Image (cartoon, grey):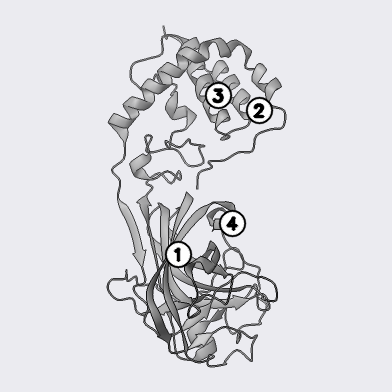
Amino acid sequence: MKQRNKTKTTNEMPALRRLGQFVLAVHSANKTTAGALALLLLAFQTSAASFSFSNGDPDGKIATLSRPSSTGKIQTETADDFMVTQSVVISQATFTGLLPSGAALTSINDVEIELYHVFPGDSALPPSGNVVTRTNSPADVEIDSATRDSANGSLTFSATIVNPSFTASNSVVNGINKHPNEKTKGEGAVTGEEVLITVNFDPPISLPADHYFFRPEVLLSRGDFLWLSAPKPIVAPGTPFLTDLQSWIRNDALAPDWLRIGTDITGQGPFNAAFSLSGETDADADGVADSLDLCPGTPAGAIVDANGCSIDQIAPCSGPASGGTWKNHGQYVSAVAAAAEAFLSQDLISADQAEEIVSQAAQSNCGFTRK
């Protein structure tokens, strides 16, 4: 994935002053840059395609705990898998579960979403041996860049009661044990309020094509949130895919390992979990959805702005993005300086990086008339 954030240095002003000879030209270069971006919008915007995934509606077979740690309670996580066949930017997710009967929607204090690669990615090898298998489980640790939490403002959520009284035939809450004591057969039927939780990600989650696990956690002021299962195999209105795995669970006592809910614990599965994802394609994998990307085809690893444009695309060596050629070398360097200043002001690059970018532009042959 391309990088979109760089930490600013603690001493930016001296570095900014070292841009010296280019500062006077920035104003005019900004006009050139703005014109270039306007043309990019008209000429090069990639055709956007939507992305969506769904496991379908709850099937009432099982409800499993998924909560963060709190006073007197250990963290317990349930995760289920999905597939991405091309680079996407995910802006929204939904998942369905149970609140305790009679609980108000305002009892939802926090929602956190994590994504995981499939084991053995992001995992220690060999595994501990505390579970029957780790094949096709979530990884040991989450994808840090894909974590979103209402507590820090990186997601917002809303909740809707779907059914004031919904019963799941079985549940897993506390019976999450190391091998050979994993087969508890579940903890019996549970009834509660069926609730659909919708989350919006800010910033959206950028993912390359791969197989992932989705893990929601919900903190309640009273009681626990139980995530409801969905049909396996996936049926309409879900999104079937051939490599569909199954839902897994763990708590702090079992981590970093995971157990298969249906195969290891209850013997009644395998199960899926009720969730959906939506967003857009991101053809050049720069973290900017195609409908917003003014600069398709950005090279891998390039730092881009909110328009999906790198400095090299805003101020190409070959000539202004609006067309034609640079009047002279100074015009090119001024355009690069303006773009670097904009990236610096958006915290995309550090002052030292900005200085180096402008220095390289000054040493280049871009904008010189060939004889």
Mark before the other along the chain sequence, 3 or 1? 1
Amino acid at circle 1: His
Q: Nearer the viewer, residue 91 or 156?
A: 156
Say whether residue 326 is left or right of residue 135. left
The percent position of residue 104, horizontal first and vertical second, equals: 49, 71
Q: Nearer the viewer, residue 234 or 121?
A: 234
Residue drawn at the location 43% of the way across and 37% of the way down: 308
Question: Which residue carries the number 2 mark?
Answer: 352
- What crowding class fits label 1: few (fewer than 14 Cα within 10 Å), some (14-19), or many (20 or more)? some
Asked if disc 1 and disc 4 are in contact, CB closer than 8 Å, the reply is no
Say whether residue 97 is left or right of residue 6. left
Residue drawn at the location 51% of the way across and 66% of the way down: 106
Q: Which one is closest to the eye, mark 3 or mark 1?
A: 3
Q: Nearer the viewer, residue 232 or 134?
A: 232
Q: Which one is closest to the eye, mark 1 or mark 4?
A: 4
Amino acid at circle 4: Ala
Mark before the other along the chain sequence, 3 or 2? 3
Q: Label 3, label 2: how many angstroms apart (C-alpha)?
A: 11 Å
Question: Which residue carries the number 4 mark?
Answer: 151
